[in-house]
Amino acid sequence: MTAAGPGGKATSAPLMGRDPEPTLFELSSPGRVASNFRTTGVPEWAAEELVPAAHLREAPAPIAEISERDLVAHMTRLSHRQFSVDLGAYPLGSCTMKYNPKLCDDAVARAGLADVHPAAPASLTQGWMALLTDLESALCRITGMAAATLQPPAGAAGELTGLLLMRAFHGAAGEDRRRRRVLIPDSAHGTNPASVTLGGYEVTQVPSDDRGCVDLDALAARLDDDVAGIMLTNPNTLGLFEEDIVAIAGAVHGVGGLLYYDGANLNAILGVTRPGDMGFDIVHMNLHKTFAVPHGGGGPGAGPVAVTERLSSYLPGPRPEAAGDGTYAWVEPERSIGRIHSWHGNALALARAWSYILANGGDGLRRVSDAAVLNANWLRHQLRGTYDIPYDRPCMHEFVASATNLKRAGGLRALDVAKRMLEEGFHAPTTYFPLIVEEALMIEPTETESPQTLAALAQALREIAGDTAEEGHAAPRTSPVGRVDEARAARRLVPTWDARSDA
Amino acid sequence: MHFVPHTDAEIADMLASMGLSSLDELFDAVPAALRLAGGLDLEPGLAEADVAGRFDDYAAANRPVGRSLVCFAGAGAYDHDIPSVVGRLAYRSEFVTAYTPYQPEVAQGVLQALFEYQTLVCRLFGTDVANASLYDGASATVEAVNLAVAATGRQEVWVSRGLHPHWRQVLATMAVGTGHQLVDVALDDGLTNWPVDGAPGAIVVQSPNHLGCLEDVGAAGELARRLGALLVVATDPVSAGLLKSPGSLGADVVVGEGQPFGASLSLGGPYLGLFACRREHVRRLPGRLVGETVDTEGRRAYVTTLRTREQDIRREKASSNVCTNQTLMAVAFLVHLSWLGTSGLRELALRCARGTRYCREALLAIDGVEPLAGAPVLREFAVRTPVPADVVVARMAEEGFLAGVALGEEYDAGLLVAVTEKRTKAEIDAFAGALEKVVR
């Protein structure tokens, strides 16, 4: 037995950047066991007595052989190699990385919610059904819509749901073959065009005008009776409100198309205006953005879709409805597009969002948007003159700066600015998106960062702008690892620990 | 209450620095006609303790499984013990409140956890590559079918009726957009009765299937190869403790519902879509993939890779629109499965199988209770009952049991019963006793 062998060394050296954190598989030592099982008294038949030989595995699947202590040390060290909202500001544009209130964690941590089987009859799940219908009602009030499905587990799933609703709606009018195009601005999120393809439609791109909004003439030129609808984010991905939205809605409705609202940027307009009032027919919301469901390193999210009255009979089913006598029932809408999720959506994420909405109330949600827009505009003012700001006018909850001036002057690129931000203790902004801005730095401070944090963020960004290209390229130097070789990862693909030897 | 830190004085200062005098001026770009008069039609914000009170009310109006409702229901959502390490480790706030790892230098924690998760999924399924998760079993199946159709250029998809009915419904919903032609393949005594000839692009089988029966995955694989289709196998990760892996039996794509490891029942979500395939299909892999690489100093590091497959780069040409996935559930899966370990996974599957056999024999000893299918099972089985299954479930709830899942007409309206490692002999005996009473 040597210190160099496998088996798990409980040392924090990986946190100091001295060593990589060993994988679970390197920490394994043959024969070591953490698991244990309850006493049941069930007869202890052998595997051969339970499973026909033709199906029985010859050797156990190799998982890990690790003590609980070493597993805890491993995961704890991994957690220390991870940036998070709870650690510091995360001005990642389009992602709304706001603080996730802890009361929401506790609200959903109840056996009465967590231990409910999804196939249990409705008589046993009345509390959940009440919660879901209450949430649905609030989301409809916030968006100005008539009804919503809570099934879509993420924003992209919500988009596809919305497009299938569009398809069903046009299909009922016998127009599903003719209406084959969906319009998308060139500033749109990548999920929009990908969802359009999966919905069986063709993408027609609409260019932005020099103010960063939908070009109305270009839109008119692309509108015809083969258009199924348009997908818009408002405020758009430049953080700008589409001031002509009423005219856009009129034009699209004029050719029989529907308007789809991508709710990625809903955090800007809570209590200010509603997609329904703007003329939208279908709205998805990212509860993991606007309503503070934590992102979990990439999910789970929740992407409910709300619609106007004329589309409500197409919603996915089953959906919970109040029966009128104080009870709730699962109902299949008359012309439902069908099921979107294995069960009823990411229920615990939905419940978290509801606890957040309850805590804030109507007044608190308005305050969210006020402060989110205030913070973004203040930060934009602070960076003026240091960074290019291609559309420098009042923004909503986020804005897009550009490192083009820095790149031209000394070679510092948006990527370098992002990596330098990590050294300054902040998460980086979103880079190189939207695609219509070169060297884009998309900044969304959110409402939960204090003026003091914003000032520090602005100062860091201004200082970074004075760096040489060499300093930028060397960053980040203070993180657990330095700049990562992404090209090598793709060229010499190692997707599992077991693929290492043959890579 | 709200979570905005600004004082009124700070707000006034910030506005003044921009030459503004009110917060309303920030929204000048919103046309007056669109402004919401009177604010949101929602009640005022509640204090933390009041929110907790509301949630107590919701929780009290449910009947969760537990001592007063002993769970024998499964159908893709299983009542397993979740070890304490899952809550303490996976739900650390560093994992909970991180975003997608777009900046790998400060996201090595999530990235390495996903790399280890991908490795474990491949070891369970006998595959080369696994992605960093999808939404649930249904979405993983949809993506598998999309991959197979793209790889073969054939839109006809044979789907066993042994595939979870909800997953088949989601496949049907999505097929309206993709244009795939789904062919429903019936069961015969619990096992899929495949056509002999045709030109499908994908063959989709679940094993153990929705009735709990073990399918002949190897034969389905031979059929797929003979017909030039890809074989998609949906499986239960717990079965990897005892059964041969789908990959070793010829599966091209393996999917599953990851809920049994690390996820509570929670009315069905958030769960975890498991997705894995042969290496030759990696360029069509949906969702995110983490790969190992090095940093500038040659230190081992992890990063999301083959990014050019993804929607933010490929846009309308992307094979999938997945962006947000279920990463936190993947971390919980990793912790739970690592705690079980090699011997614990086998022991878990064995205990489920033992309880299932014991329970099945006890139920079949009841007058009028008959097996729905004769094929061998692992952790779940279906029976016919003398009174309709939904009535049985309702009556058994009064007796303190969630008796199972009432199957639809397409499964002869049987009762699907699952037994996990949590069920004791005494509980199973009491369950059989109560069932005997309610079917009389």
Image (cartoon, coloured by chain):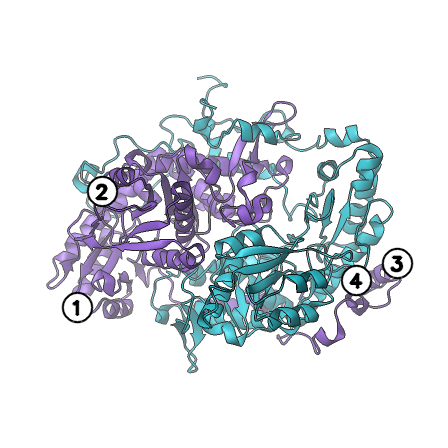
Check the image and report above or below for B131 versus A23: below
Percent of width and height locating residue B54 = 53, 70
Badge 1 and badge 2 in a common chain: yes
The residue carrying pointer 3 sits among few (fewer than 14), some (14 to 19) or many (20 or more) residues within 10 Å by Cα, namely few
Which residue carries the number 4 mark?
B7
CA gap, disc 1 to disc 4?
66 Å
Q: Earlier in the sequence, mark 1 or mark 2?
A: 2
Amino acid on which the number 1 mark rests in the picture: Val
- Between B360 and A196, the one lying in front of the other is A196
Q: Which chain is purple?
A: B
Q: Earlier in the sequence, mark 4 or mark 2?
A: 4
- Between A118 and A8, the one lying in front of the other is A118
Q: Earlier in the sequence, mark 1 or mark 3?
A: 3
Percent of width and height locating residue B188 = 17, 53
| Front position among marks 4 and 2 | 2
Q: Which chain is cyan?
A: A
Residues at circles 1 and 4 in contact by the CB criterion of under 8 Å: no
Badge 2 and badge 3 in a common chain: yes
Percent of width and height locating residue A387 = 82, 45
Which residue carries the number 1 mark?
B439
Q: Chain of mark 4?
A: B
Q: Chain of mark 3?
A: B
| Numbered label tally | 4
Q: Secondary structure at mark 3?
A: helix
Which residue carries the number 2 mark?
B216
Amino acid on which the number 3 mark rests in the picture: Ser
The residue under the point 80% across, 60% down is A394
Check the image and report above or below for A290 versus A67: below
Q: Secondary structure at mark 1?
A: loop
Query: Which of the 4 quarters of the picture holds residue B231?
Result: top left
